[in-house]
Image: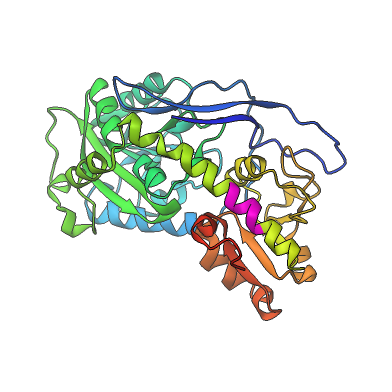
């Protein structure tokens, strides 16, 4: 469905003085015709330790999710909880503990088994889901949070594809996967994070759903019912190869738009820096053919990335203070979710006459738009 050619590992940030070339590997997405799961075709990379800083948007979403799930009755005080988290951060453990749920040791049964963006990092999807389902105690619930494939399609987020992320879930595909382990989704919540993420509550098939599952979509916001999500995905074509293949067109148009915009800025004498040395930026910069002559540096809040460079480019990663001191005319923001947060925490950019640019919106701008 999506072929990005050879790409560097998105978590491998070489030292600035390392001349490269950096190793690159095929990066392709395929769609299973039987179950509808979008998956990473192959991954010969070896994951490195995560170096990202946890954004406020992720923390706020976790707090919101716990509040809404608790109000629906799925987090009873005095029960046990097990968490499968993402290696990139976003743990709910402290939030669950504050609700009176005690953690259990690895492998033990729990009344609440939570997976927050963790499942997609498992190469064997069937085994990983079966493991999580097997740990749910009688009367318990499995909570699964994921970045929706329907969102990825709707917003053209082709650069969500990266090595180490083995699966991209539609609710349709995940419902089929849950059925294979004897579970059924009972309730869902929608969040704005990453443009649209979903949290599912699932319990064993045949087990009484309980009072919590009786809550309606109206109790939890627009698009919160499982039925609504399935209908939306059917309309979006989330398991239709012809529709999912549209991501390839987005990859071409957005990479071309970024390169064209940077060339225009340079020709106009405007200085441009970037913000957000994230995995999504790696594929975009590589596919757009961007180097230091067009983008002087990318700032990032993670100290572990400072003194390094973006994979397969000569663009250095610098502390935010260096970006502020440089007083750029524009800052290309590679993580649109951070726009509100970053404008609040770095007002100096706009105070000095600069402006923030959402790189995902560039494809819709006129060619010479500054």
Residue 49 painted magenta: no
Q: Which residues are magenta?
A: 256-261
Q: Is residue 139 visible?
A: no
Q: Position of residue 184 (x, y in %)?
A: 20, 32
Judged left or right of residue 34, residue 330 is right
Which of these two is toward me, 213 or 108? 213
**Residue placed at 23% from the left, 58% from the top?**
222
Quadrant containing the C terminus in the rendered view: bottom right
The vertical placement of 135 against 71, above or below, is above
Q: Position of residue 115 (x, y in %)?
A: 40, 37
**Residue placed at 63% from the left, 37% from the top?**
10
Q: Quadrant of residue 153?
A: top left
Q: Quadrant of residue 202?
A: top left
Which of these two is toward me, 213 or 308? 308
Judged left or right of residue 118, residue 269 is right
**Residue placed at 68% from the left, 79% from the top?**
353
- Which secondary structure class fits the magenta region best? helix
Q: Is residue 136 visible?
A: yes
Residue 259 painted magenta: yes
Colouring convention used in this rendered image of the protein: rainbow
**Residue placed at 54% from the left, 42% from the top?**
252
Q: Quadrant of residue 113?
A: top left
The vertical placement of 131 against 337, above or below, is above
Quadrant containing the N terminus in the rendered view: top left
Q: Position of residue 219 (x, y in %)?
A: 18, 59
Judged left or right of residue 366, residue 246 is left
Q: Position of residue 31 (x, y in %)?
A: 38, 26
């Amino acid at each position: 469905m999506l072929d990005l050619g050879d790409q560097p590992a998105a978590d491998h940030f070489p030292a600035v003085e390392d001349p490269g070339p950096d190793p690159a590997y095929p990066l392709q997405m395929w769609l299973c015709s039987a179950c509808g799961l979008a998956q990473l075709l192959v991954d010969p990379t070896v994951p490195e330790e995560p170096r990202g800083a946890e954004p406020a948007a992720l923390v706020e979403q976790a707090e919101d999710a716990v509040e809404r799930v608790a109000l629906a009755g799925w987090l009873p005080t005095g029960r046990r909880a097990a968490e499968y988290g993402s290696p990139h951060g976003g743990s709910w453990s402290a939030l669950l503990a504050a609700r009176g749920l005690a953690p259990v040791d690895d492998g033990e049964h729990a009344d609440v088994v939570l997976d927050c963006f963790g499942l997609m990092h498992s190469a064997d999807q069937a085994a990983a889901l079966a493991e999580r389902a097997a740990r749910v105690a009688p009367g318990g619930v499995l909570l699964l949070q994921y970045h929706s494939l329907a969102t990825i399609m709707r917003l053209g987020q082709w650069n969500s594809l990266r090595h180490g992320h083995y699966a991209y879930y539609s609710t349709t595909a995940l419902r089929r996967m849950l059925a294979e382990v004897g579970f059924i989704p009972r309730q869902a919540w929608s969040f704005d994070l990453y443009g649209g993420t979903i949290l599912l509550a699932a319990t064993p098939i045949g087990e009484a759903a309980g009072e919590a599952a009786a809550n309606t979509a109206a109790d939890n916001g627009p698009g919160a019912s499982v039925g609504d999500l399935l209908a939306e995905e059917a309309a979006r074509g989330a398991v239709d190869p012809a529709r999912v293949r549209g991501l390839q067109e987005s990859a071409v148009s957005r990479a071309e738009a970024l390169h064209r915009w940077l060339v225009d800025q340079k020709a106009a004498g405007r200085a441009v820096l970037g913000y957000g040395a994230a995995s999504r930026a790696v594929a975009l910069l590589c596919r757009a053919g961007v180097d230091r002559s067009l983008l002087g540096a990318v700032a990032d809040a993670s100290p572990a990335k400072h003194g390094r460079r973006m994979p397969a480019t000569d663009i250095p990663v610098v502390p935010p203070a260096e970006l502020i001191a440089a007083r750029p005319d524009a800052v290309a923001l590679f993580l649109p979710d951070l726009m509100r947060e970053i404008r609040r925490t770095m007002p100096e950019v706009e105070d000095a006459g600069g402006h923030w640019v959402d790189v995902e919106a560039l494809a819709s701008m006129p060619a010479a738009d500054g």
